[in-house]
Amino acid sequence: QVQVVESGGGSVQAGGSLRLSCAISGDTYSSNCISWFRQAPGKEREGVASIYTGSGRTYFYADSVKGRFTISQDTAKNTVFLQMSGLKFEDTAMYSCAARRGVCFQESYMYNYWGQGTQVTVSS
């Protein structure tokens, strides 16, 4: 089993920054791909960014966040971060971290383990 716990959400004005954290525990062998997803009210969940924890290689960034968001990790703490800068009103969403073993995917249904989510609210 893998446990996923997100933190770091909050309210920020447009143009501001936040850093989300995703702490992974348990069977980390089954969680070599970590992805951030987000879901705004009335919208479908979308992939934001993914990273391979073994190599630190980034799998993808959504076009809407390229150049503004950065995914990274602290391997000693089994934690993946999502640094968000230049936040826009449309970044407002519930952000969730998900883990899976093997290849990263952009599709949320491919992920086995999910955290409870952390809310990000950007005011314009």
Image: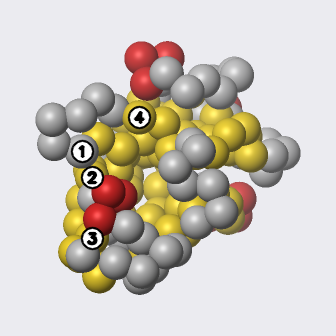
Residue at 60% x, 24% y is: 105
In front of the other: 24 or 33:
33
Left or right: residue 31 compared with residue 36: right
The residue type indicated by label 4 comes to Glu
Q: Earlier in the sequence, mark 1 or mark 2?
A: 1
Q: Verify CB contact (< 8 Å) between mark 4 and mark 2.
A: no
**Residue occupied by mark 4:** 46
In the figure, 119 relative to 47: above or below? below
Residue type highlighted by circle 2: Ala
**Tag shown at residue 122:** 3
For disc 2, the neighbor class at 10 Å (few under 14, some 14 to 19, many from 20) is many
Relative to 16, say whether 75 is above or below.
Answer: above
Q: Quadrant of the N terminus?
A: top left
Q: Can residue 26 be seen in this snapshot?
A: no
- Callout 1 touching callout 2 (CB < 8 Å): yes
Tell me the distance, in whole angstroms, between the alpha carbons under discs 4 and 2.
10 Å
First-in-chain label (1 vs 3): 1
Label 2 or label 3, whichever comes before in sequence order:
2
Looking at the image, residue 110 lies above or below residue 40:
above
x then y, percent, for residue 85: 52, 74
Q: Give the residue furthest to the top.
A: 110
- The front one of 55 and 28 is 55
Q: Amino acid at mark 3?
A: Val
User: Within the image, what quadrant is residue 100 found in?
Assistant: top right
Q: Which residue is mark 1?
A: 40
The secondary element bearing badge 3 is classed as strand
Label 1: element kind: loop
Counting residues from the start of the chain, the first of labels 1 and 4 encountered is: 1
Q: Residue at x 68, y 40 (%)?
A: 60
